Image: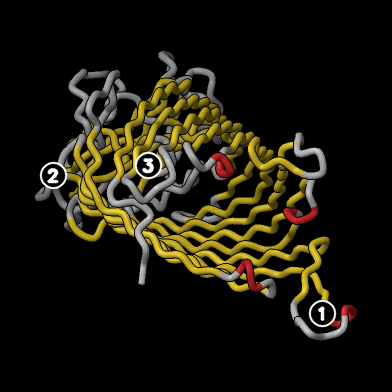
Amino acid sequence: MISPVSEGYFTGSSRLFFRWDPPRSPRRLDLVALASGTSYGSQANGNDSDLRLTARYREGLGSRIILNTSVAGWRFRREEAAIFDLDLLRGEARLGWAPRRNWLVSLGARYTRSSYPNRLLPPDSTKAELQQPFDVVFGMLRSLGRTGYLGSELSYRVVASNTPRSRYRGPVVVLRAGTEVIHRTFLSGYAVYGRRDYRESRILVRPGATAADSVEARRDDAWQIGMNLERRLGNRLRLFLEGDYLIQNSNASFADFDQAQVSIGVSVDVVALGGRREPSAVVSRPSPLAPLISGNEVRFRILAPRADSVSVVGGFNGWDPARNPLRGPGPDGRWEATVRLAPGIWRYAFVVDGVWTVPPDAPRYEPDGFGGRNGMLEVVAGSGGEAVTDDDSIRPRR
């Protein structure tokens, strides 16, 4: 039998987003602020308030290597259950490498400082519990078409604390996958295994035995699976179904438990301020740098007067910078190359001195799945070459 945590809930949130992304630069900075509040039904212990601030910095270190760093703060409060109150500060750095198209390998480290202001420690009960996890993380990601992905992550965590009962270490393994199952309907899921070894927390595990035989270090094993199904009904309206199941086994009987959660509801964006380019939005402004399409030949152009080398990459050449170099620079600083393409829709970008660059004034744009944009163009059928209906390849992360 499953006991409900809440018979209904309502969450309201406000999000502020700022991005600094200089043209023709491998750098990018994102600043995000999120404030939210949740009101639960009669089964829950009070309402939640949530404030999060995040800064993310990314820099390309070559055509296939990228550095991602982030700093985040989180303040969480729950009425009538102050033991869950949390003040958190987190810093993370990861180095990503794309060994081939659609693959990303990353290695990084993460430090977290978690303070629980209402978990007071004896004997004087004036000091709050503090936990400081440190993680070393290795991850792999495989893109599948425009929306699908498979990912895995292996980390090892060491948690320091001002109380021995919260100090532990152990591995965590995460598997993730997602795809668009039908038009505007997305399915994602995950599976997690974690091991915790509390080397300083001793427990009685065999009552009735001698003291020497009945005391050992606490060990926990936890498995969790979850899924999310989302149907987009418009730019501001979504239906969602979420569920997860968690089970933990321990040699300490008080730490054994299992938990199931299911949420279903509607998400509505009431007010949106500021412009946002939708995927594949048409750029109507003509430009002398837009690609020229004549039959099944496309003339690519970009202005880079100080560059030493420029290439065009896309689904037509496996996103390989060595396949189609441009000639230049000309007297006006332009680089050019003509590529013969089969009929269809093609995604492309430029690589300027090893830096992946958004193509200027492409006929259309589309997110590349990693925070940047690809240009898009169409070669009309009947112009020669093998028929192609669409180019679903995704470029490797910069």
- Spot the residue most to the bottom: 209
**Can the viewer see residue 91?**
no
Q: How many labels does the image show?
A: 3
114, 311: nearer the viewer: 114
Could you tell me which residue is drawn at 41 percent across and 42 percent down? Answer: 313
Residue at image mark 3 = 368
Within-10-Å neighbours for mark 2: few <14, some 14–19, many 20+: some
In this view, 6 is above or below 337: below
- Spot the residue most to the top: 332
Helix or strand or loop: what does disc 3 sit on? loop
Q: Nearer the viewer, mark 2 or mark 3?
A: 3
- Is 252 placed left or right of 351 in the picture? right
Residue at image mark 2 = 380
Which quarter of the figure has residue 186? bottom left
Residue type indicated by callout 2: Val
112, 78: nearer the viewer: 78
Q: How far apart are marks 2 and 1 (CA)?
A: 77 Å
Q: In which quarter of the image is the N terminus?
A: bottom left
| Sequence-wise first label, 1 or 3 | 1
Residue at image mark 1 = 214
- Is 272 placed left or right of 224 in the picture? left
In this view, 10 is above or below 3: above
- Is 216 placed left or right of 262 in the picture? right
Q: Which of marks 1 and 3 is in front?
A: 1
Q: Where is residue 64 in the image (x, y as percent from the top left)?
A: 55, 45
Could you tell me which residue is drawn at 37 percent across and 63 percent down? Answer: 3
Asked if the residue at tag 1 contacts the one at tag 2, i.e. Cβ–Cβ closer than 8 Å, the answer is no
In this view, 112 is above or below 169: above
